[in-house]
Amino acid sequence: MSEPEPPKAAPTDADRAELRRHGVLLTSMDELCAWGRSHSVWPLQFGLACCAIEMIAASMARFDIARFGSEVFRASPRQADLLIVSGTVTKKMAPAVVRLWNQMPDPKYCIAMGACAISGGPFKQGYNVLKGIDRYVPVDIYIPGCPPRPEALLHGLMRLQERIRERAVDGAGRVTGAAAAECPVPEYGGHDLEPPQNPGLWQPPVLVRKDGA
Amino acid sequence: MNVPDLQALASVPGPAIRAVHDEFHGDLLEVSMGPHHPSTHGVFRMIVTLDGETVVKLKPVFGYLHRNHEKIGENTSYLASMPYTDRLDYFCSMTNNWAYALAVEKLAGQAVPDRAEYVRVILAELTRLLNHTCLAGFLLQDGGASGTPLMYAFREREKILDLFESLSGSRMMCNFQRFGGCRVDPDPAWLAAARTLADGYGRFLDEFERLLTGNEILMARTQGIGRLSPALAVGAGVTGPILRASGVDYDLRKVDGYGAYPRLKFRVPLGDHGDTYDRYMIRVLEMRESISLLQQALADLPAGPIMDPKAKLRGFRPKAGEAYGRIEGPKGEIGFYLISEGGPNPYRYRVRPPSLINLTILEDLCLGHSIADAVVILGSIDIVLGEVDR
Amino acid sequence: MESAEQIRERILAGVPGADISVLPNPAPSAQHSILLGPGRAREIAIFLRDAPGLKLDLCSNATGVDWPQHGYLEVVYHLYSVELKHGPVVIRQRTANRGDAVTLPSLTPVWRSCEFQEREIFDLFGVVFDGHPDLRRLLMWDEFKDHPMRKDYVEPDDFEWEPTPHGDVLAKARGHYPAAVPKEGPAP
């Protein structure tokens, strides 16, 4: 009786490159899906403030986000997979943003574009300004700038595409794999939103000065 | 009559769509348009009550972009508020800067050299071109021409933004005017580029107009829609192209005669009917006047300092008092009201937002029209939420 | 354009017995204002709007100001004339105090442009306008309880983060993180 064959080694990248040169594509379903997903990210048509204009400029003729696969900006969250939070998120607007995020089907991604979406930006000292959308919604890519140039948004999108390709497709399919798919929606309180942040997602950063003050 | 359970059908929890029973009108439908909506020009919400497709009531809801700019203004020095004025009407940062600089110059009695006045006019007219071009693009986008006029508009906008970027360092948030002049003196290369742009803009406008002005669909969608009577416009504080489209001759560049405008020749176009088509045409005509103003200002630009030599750059503390300064921005009268108590920060810093006050008549214009017309009317009022909510 | 004194004379001629005074403005802008006493503000406003030599039909700006040191809230209106192309005429109204007597007559029935601006002053300062057709909050949500533009408003504590905290931010942060990192001692 012959010995059972030793398991074949998985094809290396060099093997794949060789095969590709001969016109043979060797891949796995995961990789194919990830490749397809990364190259057809459709953003939600969601602009809050000044960064929205740079986002629109990125979709116009000079910068052309369509060549990265984001051909259309969908108006309905049910049809979009990327939420580009572009502009200041105010506390009045925050419940609507979270509700939109909840309505987007998985896999979904979020880009915080601009200083205001990352941390409140120049309007940080504001009674109505939410100091960063990552207090309620899990963010995958942060693009700094005020406003970031359209090229910066494209760079952020390319980085998001890389991250999508690096992750295998699994049940949740989300890039960060954090938090529940359904984020709790804040309510309007008497003085502030209730809750002021989503405790499952965001913890206040530790603020320690080196001089121990 | 069996009213379907709209709550169950709504994709948004809460009172986004609600059936309203009214014994005189049968069943009315209350729809919440916004704050996330493709055509509300930002995070603006309108609670529209519909009888079929006709608007019977429209209540706007503001505040989704309220960034308490005025409170920040009380806690920052005069100069440090200049970058915040860029972010008010984020399309037109140069004119916002100018309005604020004008108000502070009135408060402090600061003079401005001639060269700076002409440069301010050049930048303001470039901003007006940019704003009105984008408005035409957005208006048609709202009307359903999804994307193409906006592409043309943004192509021209990019050319103007290149000029702004090479002069001030930033495409949109220019932070360019200072109290007593401008931050940077444009060099001859920049002036030549501006001249080329001004000379070539007329051809772009001809192409744009050929496609749009006589366009059957545009005319059918906008003529007779949203008529604004002059009496209502003036009483409601409406200013800018909308007021002039209703036939009222009130352009601050002529009335107040600020800056270098008294020395330049231009006409003020007025509309006849006050409908949406007139509001669109006024902006096209204003663009042509802006090109002429640009060419005049570029030709007459005097030599001299760009900043008043006696301007106080550090430790700026105007004496106690108050001032209200206003200019004709592309959207209307943008004014700043400042109260000083002698300190480095203003005691009260108020922005007079043209977009918010122009929205006073939104309900009046939309009543009786269909909801699709309400979108086009809102587009023709030309609002920017950064200014409405500050 | 007439001076503030002349306008005051005219108002007294048109609305006899009105309680008005001229407040000079020391700044170089020389925009002096007319303080309207309580009671007949709306009559005076109608007179200003309709008087043949004034015709101040555009109320361009309505501002609220908080004066805790003087103990009142103030509303300032800037009036212009579209017909006669002059202006500004600045009129002011003051409340009795900052606590319970904060009602002023609304000028929205005279100039419709005050509609949203007075709502904003109600929202941010707390001045109640008597006669306003629709007085509710404009910029903040309806359940909000404070009047944020007042000078004594305290913001909610929001875990503001800065890389190099100092001043207010550091003071607030100490409330969140009472223990600082202890200095490292010698290794045991």
Image: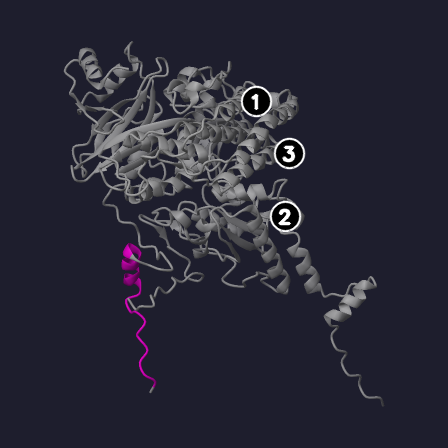
Label 3 with label 1: CB-CB less than 8 Å? no
Relative to B239, C110 lies left or right: left
> Which residue is found at the position 49% from the left and 43% from the top?
B169
Quadrant of the frame with the C terminus of chain B? top left
User: Circle 3 marks a residue in which chain?
Assistant: B
What's the residue type where badge 2 is placed? Ser
- In the displayed structure, B384 sits above or below A124; it is above
What's the residue type where badge 1 is placed? Thr
The span from disc 3 to disc 1 (Cα, nearest Å) is 18 Å
Q: Which residues are magenta?
A: C167-187
Task: Locate residue A48, reporting x and y percent.
Answer: 48, 43
Relative to C21, B106 lies left or right: right
Q: Is residue C90 visible to the viewer in this orientation of the structure?
A: yes
Q: Residue A70 bears which disc, if any? A: 2
Q: Count all numbered tags in the image, as a single digit.
A: 3
Q: Nearer the viewer, mark 2 or mark 1?
A: 2
- In the displayed structure, A87 sits above or below C21; it is below
Q: Residue A170 bears which disc, if any? A: none
Q: Nearer the viewer, mark 3 or mark 1?
A: 3
- Residue B72 position by quadrant: top left
The span from disc 2 to disc 3 (Cα, nearest Å) is 17 Å
Furthest residue toward bottom: A1
What's the residue type where badge 3 is placed? Thr
Task: Locate residue C74, reporting x and y percent.
Answer: 22, 32
Report whether mark 2 lies on the same chain as mark 3. Answer: no
User: Circle 1 marks a residue in which chain?
Assistant: B
Disc 3 marks which residue? B148
Label 2 with label 1: CB-CB less than 8 Å? no
> Which residue is found at the position 60% from the left and 64% from the top?
A171
